[in-house]
Image: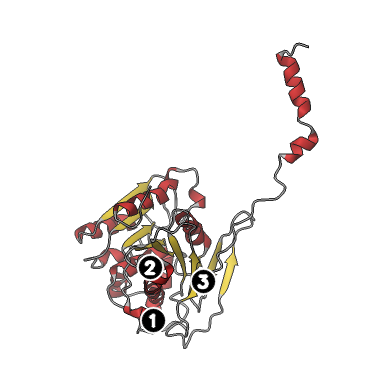
Amino acid sequence: MSLNRRTALGLAALAVTPATAHALVPLTEPTAPPDPVETLRLWPAGAPGGERVTVTPRVVERSTDPAFHDRFAQYTTDPILTVLRPARPNGASLLLIPGGGYKWAVIDKEGLDCARVFAAAGITCFVLRYRLPGDGWAAGPDAPLQDAQRAMRLIRARAADDGLDPARIAVLGASAGGHLAGLLTARPDPTYAPVDAADADPFRPELSILLYPVATMTDPFVHAGSRAELLGPAPSADATTAYSLERMDWTGAPPTFLLHALDDEAVPVENSLGLLSALRTHNVPVEAHLFEQGGHGFGIRLIAGKPASVWPDLVLAWGARHGWITQS
């Protein structure tokens, strides 16, 4: 029997029976990856200055898609680090500080989602769930910074036991978390009294990665919501200056990486541009990447398929040049 093109197409059509076609459809819907089970409490005896705190912690899920989580934590009273350990650790570690406008702290988008990408590169990741400045803590606007400083000290103090290099710890902060990571990087002053031996360790990171950071607290480029949550509805000129990253003394700060999208309507790119100028003035090694598109708060999932999706690779290459990791 000769097999011409028409006969072959007919046989191929018959071969795809309903049962065969059905077998090609996934039997289950995609589901979000499981949460890491390892967490570390920052303050085993309780966070400092909480005598007047009356809030009740909550976690809110915004996603209706089972394929991914989009949660935030609000009214946190017991700050934690969620740990993601890579299959093949390379000795480097990363403290991740998600954003949320100081009204809440994102868990997934700029936290666990980003951590999974860097853990796949061999980096041990610690995602910070921090206290918020408007919840009645005695330290007020420094309450989140207390948590960030304590987190960095704990990571460094545990490094030997965790098989990590205490001299290869970076911080990554996004949006308001970028502001908090900037404070952690720039300010040399401890914000709380020591509570144990870990507090003898330094809290400055070796590298600082700031994604679309809320840098300034001054008009016209301030993210008004972050300023109001951090400093109140009518902050003084002294307060806005003190908490504006571009107004700080960055002398001696570690190498810093800036990333921003030019179409960011929530936190204008001038936040990064002003900070870039300040870093150069203080002779801080700095690398900056500006993308035409991306908007704000893109993390990993929301930038898929766009040019800015290369940002983790840019961070890894930059980190390799500064000795944070070794790239193959």
* Residue topped by disc 2: 180
Q: Residue at x 43, y 72 (%)?
A: 229
Amino acid at pointer 2: Leu
Q: Position of residue 270 (x, y in %)?
A: 32, 55
Cβ–Cβ under 8 Å for marks 3 and 1: no
Q: Is residue 217 visible?
A: no
| Earlier residue among tags 3 and 1 | 3
Residue ID at (47%, 82%): 44
Residues at circles 2 and 3 in contact by the CB criterion of under 8 Å: no
Q: Nearer the viewer, residue 186 or 165?
A: 165
Q: Is residue 112 left or right of residue 168?
A: right
Label 1: how many residues lie within 10 Å, few (<14), some (14-19) or many (20+)? some
Residue labelled with disc 1: 139
Asked if residue 187 lies left or right of residue 74, the reply is left
Q: Please say if the residues under marks 1 and 2 sit with CB atoms less than 8 Å apart.
A: no
Nearest-to-viewer mark from 2 and 3: 3
The residue carrying mark 3 is 39
Give 327 or 98, whichever is nearer the viewer: 327
